[in-house]
Image (cartoon, rainbow, N blue to C red):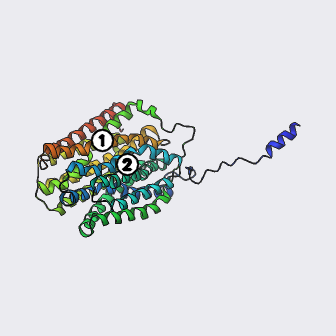
Amino acid sequence: DDMLSVNSVSEQPPTDVTPKWWASKSLEHKPIEGAYAWTVVASGFVMLMFAMGCVASYGSYQTYYHLHQFPHEPTSTLSWIGTFQFAILNMFGIPAGILCERFDSRLVTFVGGLIMGASLIIASFCNNSVWKLMITQGFMFGMGAALMYIPAVSMPAQWFTKHRALAVGIVISGSGIGGLWLTSATTHMITQLGTAWALRITGIIIFAVNSVASLFMRNRLVVKSREKIVDFTILRDLRFLLIFCGSVCGTLAYFTPLFMLPSFAIQVSGKSDDFGTNLLTIFNAASTVGRIATGQVAASLGNINTLSLCGLIASLSVLVLWLPFQSGGTLVACAIVYGLFCGGFVGLVPVVMAELWGIQRIATIIGLLYISNFIGTMIGAPSSSALLDNVGGGTNYKPSIIFSGVFMMIAFLFFAVLRVSVNRSLIAKV
């Protein structure tokens, strides 16, 4: 009887443990820092080129909306469109992180590109109303961008160890490259074709290109289903709270130069529309260089040291180069220095997170951290615009400039405290 029972058990068909087609699959057999790892980097670079490039180039739309399409709308109202793009991207960071851990990242990023493209195409048919643009070009676009951004910045950390900062820096530099050419392309499309066709063409390109790029965005590690979906115990970690608060303050400051340098150049410095657009191009070019170069600097100085340094110099560039001056030369200098070091500020945060808490849960941890960016964005750009409208009378930018420079300095102070909390030796590589 015992023999029969054993045979009957052994003859039972094996349980099918093959993952579903939509489930996240492990690629641990692929080598660290191998050829496929760099394919993931290239895929993430392309995704951020459009996801963040469109956010970076919104200044072209806002300038046109403010001067031509909606001249009677307050700047603070128009800024909500760009604010929603970045804020919603960050608010959906946790859901996006969970989705790319539980589902195949290729599917998640494909859906993200589909939503982004559709949002701009829909916006092109309702661009006679600011509130409709807030919903489509702002809110809906941000939802789709989150599904591309979080996998793109978190997956490379799973594929690299020695060159992790460089890999993440290259991916995030895609946003600078995107802003670099999208700003110019968007301005020309708006001038030649109008905002409706500019939105349609951009939406179609995003869907087509991302459909190909998403094929290569793969997880290397799979989170076990028995683990917590989101580990909120990290909120009790002082290091996380310092990064969180620093990110809130940094994001409060981040978009003021990006959105206001072009209109400042036109209104205050008396420069042409093309000069204002070129400032955005210069900023995005410098930001691209900064996101890659700071990865190399961090390899020598340490990730947290370099992150702190970026916050300090970004703050000084606003307070020293922009606040006291109105000349075109100092505006260009501010765009270069601010772009270089804000690029590093953005690029190093995911690397620091991976260094402090490992790569297994990196997507959801970064998603949780990016709630700080949501808070900072929802408060920062509208507050800066309100200062311009209500305190500066629409032409005095100094209150907004001070607002940006001071909060970036506070961000530096939080990162400096983080650095000391990790290692009290002032000469240590941290």
Decide which of 425, 98 is in the foreground and name it.
98
- Tell me which residue sits at (48%, 44%) in the image: 98
Q: Mark 1, residues whose alpha carbon is within 10 Å: few (<14), some, or many (≥20)?
A: many
- Amino acid carrying label 2: it is Leu
341 lies above or below 277: above
Residue, disc 1: 376
Location of residue 268 in the rendering, given as x and y in whole percent from the top left corner? 11, 53
Instruction: Specify which label sits upstream in the sequence, 2 or 1.
Output: 2
In the rendered image, which quarter is residue 274 located in?
bottom left
How far across and how far down the image is residue 115, in percent?
A: 42, 56
The x, y position of residue 421, in whole percent, is 35, 31
Q: Quadrant of residue 384?
A: top left
The residue labelled by disc 2 is: 89
Q: Amino acid at mark 1?
A: Gly
> Which quarter shows the C terminus?
top left
Q: Is residue 302 visible?
A: no
Give residue 271's mark. Answer: none
Could you tell me residue 371's position as x and y percent? 37, 41
Residue 280 visible (yes or no): yes
Residue 58 position (above or below residue 198) = above
In the figure, is residue 269 to the left or right of 8? left
